Amino acid sequence: MALPPIMPVQNDAALPDAVDVAVIGGGIAGVAAAYYLAKAGQSVAVLEKGVIAGEQSSRNWGWCRVQNRDEREIPLMQRSLELWDGLRAETGGDYGFRRDGLVYVTRSQADMDRWQGWVDMARQYQVHSRMLTAQEARAATPGNDGAWIGGVASPTDGMADPFIAVPTLAKAARRAGATIHQRCAVRGLDMTAGRVAGVITEKGRIRAGAVLLAGGAWSSMMLRRHGVDLPQASIRSTVFLTQEAPNVTAGGMNTPEITISRRENGGYIVAANNRGRIELTPAGLRHARKFWPTLVSRWNSVSFGMGASFFRGPDAHMGRWSFDRPTLFEAEDMRILDPKPSQGVEEPALAQLARSWPALAGTRAQATWGGWIDSTPDAVPVIAPIDALPGLFLSTGFSGHGFGIGPGAGRLAADLILGVSPIVAPEEFRLDRLIDGSPIRQPGMI
C-alpha cells in the first residue's frame, strides 16, 4: 500500500528562455516562494525532477503548529499560520487547513517540566499554548485511559492536507504567472563571471536573475557540486494512513506511544513513536561531528542501520558530475524519492491504537509510506542568500517540520530575493551559523 494519490498539477512543457527567478524544487518551500514571487510581478519557473509535492511535502503529518517549536522558528511559524488562514480566500483553493488544535499528553514529569519551560518562554511571543492538569489531559483525550499526569495544548494550531495543499498552491502560483515544469531535473547552476546566471536542466538552459534552491534532501548534493558545504543529513520515517474510523479527536494528538492526526475524510495519519531511522551514508559520516550533540539528545527516538542509501540517493557520494549528460536526478528510481517504509510498523501501531482508544479497535491501514527528512545539525532550516555563489538563495533543512512553516518560509525566501523588508528577521536562518566554526546551538523543542 503506497502513498495515496497526490493532486496532479498541470505542466508547462515549453521552457522559458529566461525568468527573473528559477526555483529548484516543487515542495512547499519552493512552491510557496514561487507563489509570492509571482504575486510580486516576477517571472518564475518552478523546476521539479519528479512531480509537485512528490517527496516530503506529501509524506508528513500535515501539522501546522507553533507549539513545541524551537524558539528561533516561532515568529516565522506565527506568520505562516496567518498565511495559511488567508490562502483559501486569496487563491480560491482548498488546502484542507483548519485550526482544530493540538494536544500532547504524558505520564512523565520530565515531559511536563520541558513543556512548562517552553510555555513560559513562548509567552513573550503571545503564544496561546497552555499546560493541562491531569484532569484536563484526560478530558482532552476522551476514550483514552492513559493515566496522564498532564499535558500541553494549543487550540490555535492545526493542520492542512498534505495530499492537496502544495498542488493547490502550485496551481495558484501558475495562475499568478509562474510556470511549472515537472519531470525536468536541474543538472546544475549556470555560472557567469562567478555569479549564478541561471540553471541547466535536462531539457535545456534557462537564464535567471536569481535562483532559489529548495531541493529538500537533495540540496546538499547540489551545493557540493558547486563547492558550497551544507551540513545536512537525512532521517527515514514511516507513516501510515488508516481507513475511516470513529472520531476520537478533531485535531492532532501526541501520546508517549503514538501520534495521530484526524483527516477530513475520517481517517487518521498515524506515526508510531521511536520510528525514525538514521542510515549510515557518506553525507552523514562527513558531518557526524556537527550532528553528534543533537543525535545524543535524540538518542531514544531513532534507530540506526545501513542500506542502499549509502551508495545511491541524496546522501551518497557523487563527486563532480557533468551537466551534458543524464544525472542521478533523472534516474527513474530517483525522480521521486520513495524510501521503503520500515517493516513491522503497521501492526504494532494499530494494536497500540486499539489499546489507546478502544473505539478504534479493528481500524485498518489504508496506505503506508516512507519519507526522507532533510535535517540540519540544529534542526532549524537555512533560508538565506549564499554569499559564495551570488544570485543563489537557499531554502532547505526543515528537519521534519517544514510543511506547516512552508508558507512563511516561502514568503521569507521571496522577500530576500526581492530585496524587500522580510516577513521576519532572517538572521536565525543564515547558512553561516552551521559552517563558520562557531558552536552549533542545540535544537530547542521540535
Image: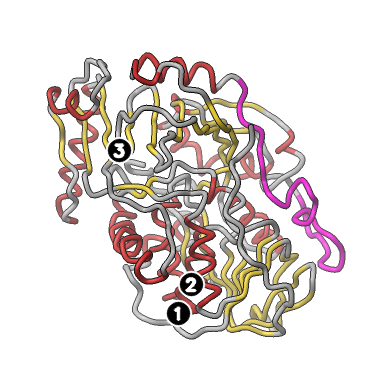
> Magenta residues, as a range?
318-343
Task: Please state the horizontal and vertical placement of residue 287, each as a whole percent of the image.
Answer: 58, 44
Q: Quadrant of the N terminus?
A: top right
The correct choice, above or below, for 11 with respect to 18 in the image is above
Q: Which residue is mark 2?
A: 35
Measuring 74% from the left and 77% from the top, which residue is drawn there? 14
Asked if disc 2 and disc 1 are in contact, CB closer than 8 Å, the reply is yes
Considering the numbered disc 2 on the image, is that residue within a helix, a strand or a loop?
helix
* Left or right placement of residue 242 versus residue 103 in this view: right
Residue placed under numbered mark 3 in the picture: 250
Residue at left offset 42%, top offset 76%: 415
Relative vertical location of residue 442 with respect to residue 318 in this rendering, above or below = above
Q: Position of residue 139 (x, y in %)?
A: 17, 26
Q: Position of residue 98 (x, y in %)?
A: 32, 51
Q: Amino acid at mark 1?
A: Lys
- The answer to which image quadrant residue 283 occupies is top right
Query: Is residue 43 within the magenta segment?
Result: no
Q: Is residue 229 visible?
A: no
Residue position marked by numbered label 1 in the rendering? 39
Q: Looking at numbered disc 3 in the image, what kind of residue is underneath it?
A: Ala
Q: Nearer the viewer, residue 363 or 304?
A: 363
Which amino acid does the dot numbered 2 rest on? Tyr
Cα separation, mark 3 vs mark 2, equals 30 Å
Name the secondary structure under disc 3.
loop
